[in-house]
Image (spheres, coloured by chain):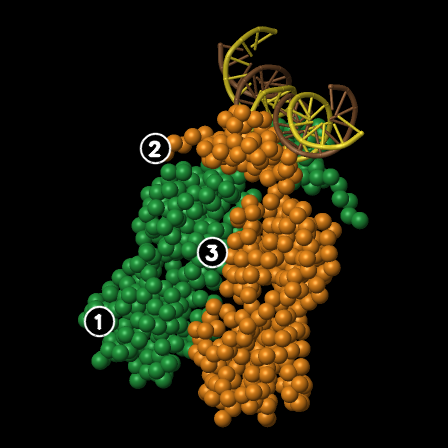
Chain colours: A orange, B green, C yellow, D brown
Amino acid sequence: MTPERTKATIFDVARRAGVSIKTVSRVVNNEPNVRQRTRDKVLRSVRELRYLPNAAARELGGKRSRVVGLIYENAQEFSYLNDLFNGALRICEPAGYTLLLRPLTLPDPEIVEHIRQFALNARVEGFVLPAPLGDLPEVPALLREMKIPFAAITPREPAPDEINILCNDEAASFSLTELLIDQGHRAIGFIKGHPDHGASAKRFAGYRQALKKNGLPYSARLVRQGYFDFDSGQTAAARLLDLPQPPSAILASNDDMAAGVIFEARGRGLNVPGDLSIAGFDDTRFSSRIWPPLTTVRQPIVRMAETAAGLLIDKLDGSDTAKPEAPFECEVVIRESTASLA
Amino acid sequence: MTPERTKATIFDVARRAGVSIKTVSRVVNNEPNVRQRTRDKVLRSVRELRYLPNAAARELGGKRSRVVGLIYENAQEFSYLNDLFNGALRICEPAGYTLLLRPLTLPDPEIVEHIRQFALNARVEGFVLPAPLGDLPEVPALLREMKIPFAAITPREPAPDEINILCNDEAASFSLTELLIDQGHRAIGFIKGHPDHGASAKRFAGYRQALKKNGLPYSARLVRQGYFDFDSGQTAAARLLDLPQPPSAILASNDDMAAGVIFEARGRGLNVPGDLSIAGFDDTRFSSRIWPPLTTVRQPIVRMAETAAGLLIDKLDGSDTAKPEAPFECEVVIRESTASLA
DNA sequence: ACTTTCATTGACAACGCTGTCAGCTTGCTG
DNA sequence: CAGCAAGCTGACAGCGTTGTCAATGAAAGT
């Protein structure tokens, strides 16, 4: 039978260290104004008793729940979420915060009520908002009304006074498009992302810039609207390939759609990349595992999530450094779904 | 400006209803021995004041955290996890429970300490243990020592006195194998799953039974060990295809490995399913989106997770119905990666 | 009518922490 | 060496519930 000692409380620690409970509280919470010797004494008995502060009492007494919420779109690519969650968790856990997930099915007419309920029930102190939640106008509005700070990941428009985690989608898209141009492609199809996501516009902008810089004409016919899902990618690809003069390369705004493009191409007996080069965005778990492996752009999502959670916690803890973060760099990953035009 | 009323407490509700706080507590917790009229009065003022019990106070006073933990292997297929989480959440949330996720990187020599820390920090009252966690001997042992109940999902050996959620992997594997046999395949390769997962043995058993029942010889040469990941599937496929008399069909114990098989086949210029039929297990998000779409087996994971969470909560709440659950049925999904032998 | 028995209700003490504020030490300053 | 500010420490009152147990009231038995 394991010692099964009754959980030690702050009283036990205080008695053992010969100080008051308040002093223990100070030490445990890293507050100033405790002599080093006292601090050591307390820390020792904390260790010896394996003292673990009771979170409920802490919250009740101190009004702080130390809960960070991560709301996300349920349809979201899960490997993205996984990275997001792992990154945020890696910061929250050692900082003594609990990270709570809440999926949302979009579009959701009652989104405000759902988030409010979640925030209230779970006593969320701060939110991490992956795209597109930072861009839906109701969400930031609600959180501001509730006075809950948040960190928006890749929002279209960085909210002033809030934490914004950005990455240079535009530059990455530019590089990817230039890569195709360098490979000799002239007619390059583009499938836009979901209009609610800030990244969509940026990726499209990078594509246009690359065309322009390289003196290629922009043709609206080669551009189709997609919604970041496989089916919309497949549909858009079908339209592009039905064109009298179909593109020799298609750039999809994410990998799910790129997979849809590959699917459609294969269905038509087209050889990828022989007959059609295809590239995407995101470097999903499956991007390297479908055939052919996909040329794509990798975002440092884990680091972005870590930064988001870190800044958010800093804000919640009041250690407000408030330095505006530089955008994260994306990386073009070249695989076998793209090739030089024969 | 929204009413921003100071959050109502149990006192406010009690005053308004003209009863004591204890009575309010009884009503809110659905305890017996409250006259119907009183109950109604209380419920009305609860509604009118939008009363929400303070979870911290509740936990401090009542010793119940209402936290359910879901630990999982981080490498786990995401769509599986997503279903698992959504299913469990769908039960936990309305029941007033918080569902907390905790990824684990296996193998983990300190797994016991990690889980213990998590359980203590998060004050987890009960765990949902997806495979293979229910099968690692340390984990159930630890939880029993800590007196934390758990619901194991598809464990190899159902633990008595605990909640076990099973599904008939064996029968599904049997059907899938018979499907291939019916299509005329005689040499059917099999890639085993990770030995830590209970499902692996069952799927293998189903394969062997189907061979036997249909009078086909079992050849160990056609069986390779895999580990549920893409790479091991690819490697195993390479070995099988290098055989002097390679199989005309390969059955992989999950879709990740099946994708690896497809990848390998494509790399060798083989036509799927023309030259090689391939089937998997799990019906992953991507199973229908790779080319060709994969014949596979779908588990009702969402329902399994719902059941797991539901039974666990029943146990935690003391409403112990303790009926042994019947195994869930899997469904064979026939797509285009399998075809009759020409 | 007079107990006895339950169902119903309430008073009040935990629960384990943090915030407030007062008191005690130090170390300086003049 | 008094006087004062700043550093350090502790006493104690909450925080919003639930558990315990006693009080009350109503129903049933004699």
Residue ID for mark 3: B84
Amino acid type, residue under disc 1 in the picture: Arg
Amino acid type, residue under disc 3 in the picture: Leu
User: Of the residues tagged 3 and 2, which is closer to the observer?
Assistant: 2
The quarter of the picture where the N terminus of chain A appears is top left
Residue ID for mark 1: B221
Instruction: Residue at 62% x, 79% y: name it.
Output: A174
C-beta proximity under 8 Å, tags 1 and 3: no
Instruction: Residue at 63% x, 70% y: name it.
Output: A168
Q: Residues within 10 Å of mark 1 (few under 14, many from 20)?
A: few
Secondary element at image label 1: helix
User: Of the residues tagged 2 and 1, which is closer to the observer?
Assistant: 2
Secondary element at image label 3: helix
Out of B134 and B97, give the one closest to the viewer: B134
Figure quadrant of residue B27:
top right
| Label 3 and label 2 in one chain | no
**Numbered disc 1: what chain?**
B
Residue B45: horizontal and vertical position, in percent?
A: 70, 36
Q: Residues within 10 Å of mark 3 (few under 14, many from 20)?
A: many
Residue ID for mark 2: A1
Residue B182 makes an appearance in the image? no
Residue B269: horizontal and vertical position, in percent?
A: 36, 84
How far is mark 3 from mark 2, CA to CA? 34 Å
Q: Which mark is residue B174?
A: none
Q: Is residue D1 left or right of residue A257?
A: right
Residue B147 makes an appearance in the image? yes
Secondary element at image label 2: loop
**Numbered disc 3: what chain?**
B
How far is mark 1 from mark 3, CA to CA? 35 Å
| Label 1 and label 3 in one chain | yes
Amino acid type, residue under disc 2 in the picture: Met
| Label 2 and label 1 in one chain | no
